[in-house]
Image: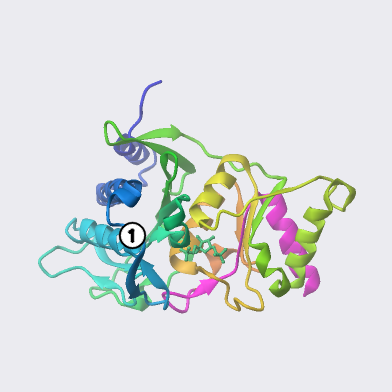
Amino acid sequence: MRRVTFTQYLVEQERKRKTVPAELRLLLEVIARACKAISHAVGKGELADVLGAAGTDNVQGEAQKKLDVISNEVLVEANSWGGSLAAMASEEMEEPYQIPNEYPKGRYLLLFDPLDGSSNIDVNVSIGTIFSILECPPDVTEPDESSFLQPGARQVAAGFAVYGPSTVMVLTVGHGTVGFTLDREVGTWVLTQPRIEIPVSTKEFAINTSNARNWPAPVRRYIDECVAGKDGPLGKDFNMRWVASMVADVYRILTRGGIFMYPADAKHKEGRLRLLYEANPMAFIVEQAGGAASTGTQRILDVQPGKLHQRIGVILGSSEEVRRVEGYYAQAG
Ligand code: AFP
């Protein structure tokens, strides 16, 4: 099969649709190279001094893992000099990162969760990197937090890498969702899924059931119906998966369908996942693959952010199931 590389895919997207100008392509290529470096560090595991706690907390007050810090440093360093960015923001940094004065600034804003699934690092379960790209407001020369507070529908690109048995990258630039696999021997990202489409229905749900006592009624109702199986109102048996790395759960859903749920609940009043660099990029990717992404009461990509690190409830995946859950929210008023 003809191997289409990451760069070739982006060049062809520009030729066909004028959606990937050279400045955006360079930014995406730099991010892809940084993900290769993170994949290499993750793959070392115990053989390098990269596991365990870093001994510091991030802005969220969460204990950082060494790989959280390493991954953040890789992405910040890689993206500082290219000239594509006006600024960047990370789950690991309280304030937006300003491009150093010795480098030119560009038109884009980059947001990322450098290592999603940190609680899985030391137990050798798949983790990943999530990124989102916005355009800097045209009249802004010194971007601050407010420059990033744009609805997810304004994203020009989004993607994530999964550092698993193979290292894969999922990407959308607004015309469908595609997947690449890292050829480690050559160090090239190869297009392996040229058109990802999420099945509209599913028999698999992903939720952390230890939160069941906190769930809102519509979620309780839906999960009870899934567990009731073929004798229940949904008329089919369901399976459950919960990796606790959003990148792994979403990649599975992109591959074979499913519904992923981390709703706002009695314990996580705003939700647990971050709107700007987890929910929004995943929602863009999932919608471009024919799925749906909702808070339960609102399309995620329509949410107007109020804070850089704000959290949000997330229900995404096979459109039929997401719409069903939205219906239960609507009925519950
Ligand atoms: P960590 O990065 O702190 O492990 O959180 C991962 C995550 O943000 C997302 O990737 C998972 O879907 C979700 O949190 C897992 O949350 P629980 O640990 O509460 O199941």
> Image quadrant of residue 132?
bottom left
Q: Residue 307 colored magenta? A: yes
Q: Residue at x 40, y 34 (%)?
A: 191
Q: Which residue is mark 1?
A: 67
Q: Amino acid at mark 1?
A: Leu
Return the residue found at the far left.
102
Q: Camera-side residue: 124 or 138?
A: 124
Q: Residue 33 colored magenta? A: no
Q: Residue at x 53, y 39 (%)?
A: 196
For this view, does 305 lie left or right of residue 91?
right
For this view, does 77 lie left or right of residue 6?
left
Quarter of the N terminus within the rendering: top left
For this view, does 307 lie left or right of residue 82?
right
For this view, does 214 lie left or right of residue 288?
right
User: Which region of the structure is painted magenta?
Assistant: 305-333
Depicted 333 relative to depicted 20: above or below: below
> Image quadrant of residue 270?
bottom right
Q: Name the spot of residue 217 as percent of width and height, x first.
A: 77, 71
Element marked by disc 1 = helix
Q: Name the spot of residue 154 as percent of width and height, x first.
A: 44, 62
Q: Camera-side residue: 185 or 3?
A: 185
Q: Camera-side residue: 9 or 93?
A: 93
Q: Residue at x 42, y 57 (%)?
A: 122
Q: Is mark 1 within 8 Å of ligand 1?
A: no
Q: Name the spot of residue 211 as percent of width and height, x first.
A: 66, 69
Return the residue found at the far front.
46
